[in-house]
Amino acid sequence: MNDSLRTVLVGFIAGAVGVLVFHQLGFFISNELGFTKVQLYNSRPVPPWSVPTIVSAAFWGGLWGVVAAFLVPRLPGALAGPLGWILFAGIVVTLVNWLVVAPLKSAPIGYGFRMPGPVVVPLVYAFWGFGMWLIARLVRQVLGGR
């Protein structure tokens, strides 16, 4: 298997599984602490293909994982490791979600920046980024390569 295909597989698996485990666990903790009321493993259909919300989230998480798998290892110094994955998910993915995805869904930028969202979302996404890094390491070991 060539390096590019391996990177795509590692990134997609890390991102998708990271959503199913770390992203949902982060929101579970936030719910338990009383900060949010997010429905976990939501099966509500999402347009246009009516797939369950959690399947859509895992798919998009997988695509973000591919981007991170190509980008983060090329960052300088400490950013090429777990810190890069954490900051990528906690900052880049959060900002794209707030500034691009929300308006595409006809929602206000940042989903209105209602508290505690501006605090909880980047923290949960950062936790997901840490999970992606862990999963990517494991998948790389299974697939071989660096």
Image (cartoon, rainbow, N blue to C red):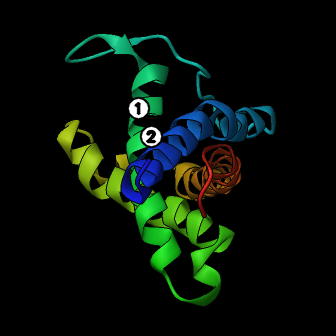
Q: Is residue 113 visible?
A: no
Q: Is residue 59 visible?
A: yes
Amino acid type, callout 1:
Phe
In-image side of 61 versus 31 (left or right) = left
How many numbered callouts?
A: 2
The residue labelled by disc 1 is 59
Does residue 11 sit above or below 49 in this rendering? Answer: below
Name the spot of residue 8 as percent of width and height, x first.
41, 48
The residue lying at 54 percent from left, 49 percent from top is: 117
In-image side of 39 versus 70 (left or right) = right
Q: Quadrant of residue 85?
A: bottom right
Query: Which is more toward the observer, 38 or 12?
Result: 12
Amino acid type, callout 2:
Gly
Residue 62 tag number: 2
The residue lying at 62 percent from left, 58 percent from top is: 126
At numbered mark 2, what does the secondary structure look like: helix, strand or loop?
Answer: helix
Report the Cα–Cα distance between label 2 and label 1. 5 Å
The residue lying at 52 percent from left, 36 percent from top is: 16
Name the spot of residue 2 as percent of width and height, x first.
40, 53
Query: Which is more toward the observer, 64 or 139?
Result: 139
At numbered mark 1, what does the secondary structure look like: helix, strand or loop?
Answer: helix
Name the spot of residue 134 as percent of width and height, x first.
71, 52
Does residue 92 sit above or below 53 in this rendering? Answer: below
